[in-house]
Image (spheres, grey):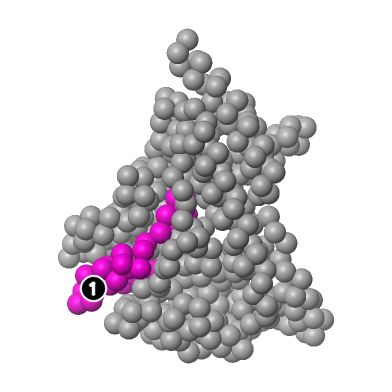
């Protein structure tokens, strides 16, 4: 189509590299190649059986039609109770809106609160959709460097220096994609204290908060004076291995929920009814599978970080949550994009360039450990062989 027909606002949207690399990896597999898939943040575990049965029974029982735009009353109530229990954020059903996945809350929070010219501080490297949503809403993206030398923690004093009279929102992702880093309890308290008397909102992305290794983290919304200024975002994709169910939620003050409801009714109408019933079972049913999956992710991620530190040309910090390893490949002399592309086509390991997550990701590669330990071990062998080849080329 002639570009002249395309609305200019579309140019503000960016792609998500994970799905691009996913397509390339699948094409290689279709050609008969064995590819170790560490590119996409999709748990390799099956959705727990009790959740599947709840959805099946719901469909058989007639939960196949529209629901209220904000979600079924019983789903909103279950989410509010879960948030109160697990996140220490007192919530009522009226504070909850159910949406198809986590991304809608990112989009809707921006569209509801950001005016053209408003500044939004976001983590870099960070989930690429943050920047995309900010730009689409007409906001000004302001990167908050998340650096290896700070153990991929936010530099709170550096964050404070980024705030201006145009700052409207700060995005926190804890634990973080792609780095596996965290905002400590002290970090969150310091940020909250700084924002206490400022008219700045926080979008708190907490989709990995049940996958924390050895630290204690808190939601910034659990601090009473921050509750009304925080939009809490969570989904079922990671914690409950439900990425294809497209079910997530936002928790905020009632006024913001009302605005997001308008955006929902004009876009998605509602989340799938049977997915909402399954979500209730996920939240209120046995949590042993959540614990098992989190333990497996920890074992895999820590193994991979340690194993990569034994490979020439690459190093990795020990992640502290989520299921990613953000590895430093600067010694290879390749850019992140060159390394990821060649690793896929020559080493047959699918991973993502650090620059997929922002400019501060240059020199890094993200490996998703949402695959079996055996596959990860095979990936490390292939990476070692690939690096030997790259380093020989560099010294030829």
Question: Residue at (55%, 39%) from the top-left corner?
Answer: 307
Left or right? Give the position of 188 relative to 340.
left
How many numbered tags mark residues here?
A: 1
Residue to which mark 1 is pinned? 193
Residue 7 visible to the viewer: no
Q: Toward the viewer: 28 or 54? A: 54
Q: Position of residue 58 (x, y in %)?
A: 76, 81
Q: Which quarter of the image is occupied by the N terminus?
A: top right
Question: Residue at (40%, 42%) from the top-left corner?
Answer: 361
Q: Does the magenta-highlighted stretch encompass residue 195?
A: yes
Q: Position of residue 272 (x, y in %)?
A: 66, 75
Q: Toward the viewer: 9 or 305? A: 305
Left or right? Give the position of 362 relative to 74.
left
Q: Does the magenta-highlighted stretch encompass residue 10?
A: no
Q: Position of residue 235 (x, y in %)?
A: 55, 69
- Please give the range of residues in magenta: 176-204
Identify the secondary structure beneath mark 1.
helix
Question: Residue at (50%, 63%) from the top-left corner?
Answer: 212
**Quadrant assignment, res 34:** top right
* Residue 44, placed above or below residue 332: below
């Amino acid at each position: 189509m002639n570009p002249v027909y395309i609305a200019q606002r579309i140019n503000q949207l960016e792609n998500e590299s994970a799905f691009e690399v996913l397509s390339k990896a699948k094409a290689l597999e279709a050609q008969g190649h064995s590819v170790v898939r560490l590119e996409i943040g999709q748990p390799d575990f099956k959705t727990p059986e009790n959740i599947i049965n709840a959805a099946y029974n719901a469909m058989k029982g007639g939960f196949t039609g529209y629901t209220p735009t904000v979600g079924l009353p019983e789903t909103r109530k279950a989410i509010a109770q879960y948030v109160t229990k697990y996140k220490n954020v007192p919530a009522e059903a009226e504070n909850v809106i159910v949406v198809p996945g986590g991304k809608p809350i990112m989009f809707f929070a921006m569209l509801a609160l950001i005016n053209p010219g408003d500044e939004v501080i976001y983590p870099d490297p960070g989930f690429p959709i943050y920047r995309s949503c900010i730009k689409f809403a007409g906001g000004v993206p302001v990167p908050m460097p998340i650096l290896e030398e700070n153990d991929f923690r936010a530099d709170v004093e550096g964050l404070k220096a980024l705030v201006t009279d145009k700052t409207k929102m700060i995005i926190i992702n804890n634990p973080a994609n792609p780095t596996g880093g965290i905002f400590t309890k002290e970090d969150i308290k310091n940020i909250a204290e700084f924002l206490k008397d400022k008219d700045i909102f926080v979008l708190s992305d907490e989709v990995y908060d049940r996958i924390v290794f050895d630290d204690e983290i808190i939601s910034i919304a659990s601090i009473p004076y921050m509750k009304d200024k925080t939009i809490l975002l969570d989904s079922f994709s990671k914690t409950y291995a439900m990425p294809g169910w497209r079910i997530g939620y936002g928790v905020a003050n009632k006024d913001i929920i009302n605005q997001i409801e308008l955006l929902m009714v004009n876009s998605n109408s509602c989340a799938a009814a049977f997915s909402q019933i399954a979500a209730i079972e996920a939240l209120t049913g046995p949590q042993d599978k959540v614990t098992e999956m989190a333990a497996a992710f920890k074992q895999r991620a820590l193994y991979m970080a340690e194993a990569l530190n034994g490979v020439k040309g690459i190093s990795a910090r020990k992640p502290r949550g989520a299921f990613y390893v953000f590895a430093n490949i600067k010694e290879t002399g390749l850019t992140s994009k060159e390394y990821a592309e060649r690793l896929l086509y020559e080493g047959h390991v699918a991973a993502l360039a650090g620059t997929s997550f922002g400019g501060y990701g240059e020199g890094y590669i993200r490996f998703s450990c949402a695959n079996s330990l055996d596959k990860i071990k095979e990936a490390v062998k292939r990476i070692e062989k690939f690096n030997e080849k790259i380093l020989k080329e560099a010294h030829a």
